[in-house]
């Protein structure tokens, strides 16, 4: 594929392979560009992310006792798989 520039700031778009597709994004966060056929692949990947082991799951709450210490802070998590494109 050819190199693209961001239409807003002129920066060279960064490329990232996602399965069979290539997604380009502005390094300054002005947007992403992908081919039309890649959109279906991204939708499938997003649905798999929520269905599979990587999506959000709930766990039963533990009984609170006086001996308990607070849990360690959880690592920040993207709200959706597509959001990881902007990391």
Image (spheres, rainbow, N blue to C red):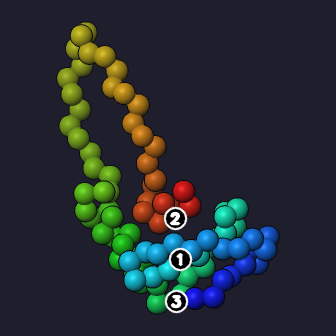
**Occupied quadrant, residue 52:** bottom left
* Real-space Cα separation, disc 3 to disc 1, in angstroms: 11 Å
Q: In the rendering, at what x and y percent does residue 31 appear?
A: 65, 70
Q: Answer with mark 2 or mark 1, whichever residue precedes in sequence.
A: 1
Q: Earlier in the sequence, mark 3 or mark 2?
A: 3
Q: Are marks 2 and 1 in contact (CB under 8 Å)?
A: yes
Instruction: Give 86 or 64, whichever is nearer the viewer.
Output: 86
Find residue 36 and report its horizontal and vertical position in percent. 52, 89
User: Left or right: 8 with respect to 31?
Assistant: right
Q: Which residue is mark 1?
A: 23
Q: Secondary structure at mark 3?
A: helix
Q: Nearer the viewer, mark 3 or mark 2?
A: 2
Tell me where residue 79 appears, x and y as whole percent.
45, 55
Of mark 3 and mark 1, the one earlier in the sequence is 1
The residue lying toward the viewer, choosing from 77 and 60, is 77
Instruction: Look at the picture and state if 51 lies above or below 13.
Output: above
Give the side of residue 13 with respect to residue 67, left or right. right
Residue drawn at x 54%, y 87% as measured from the top left: 35
Residue tagged 3: 36
| Label 3 to label 2: alpha-carbon separation | 17 Å
Q: Determine if residue 12 is in view.
A: yes
Outermost residue, front side:
2
The residue that mark 2 highlights is 85
């Amino acid at each position: 594929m050819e190199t693209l520039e961001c239409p807003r700031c002129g920066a060279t778009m960064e490329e990232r392979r996602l399965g069979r597709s290539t997604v380009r994004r502005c390094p300054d966060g002005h947007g992403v560009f992908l081919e039309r056929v890649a959109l279906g692949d991204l939708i499938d990947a997003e649905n798999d992310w929520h269905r599979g082991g990587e999506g959000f799951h709930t766990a039963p709450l533990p009984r609170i006792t006086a001996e308990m210490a607070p849990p360690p802070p959880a690592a920040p998590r993207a709200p959706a798989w597509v959001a990881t494109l902007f990391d």
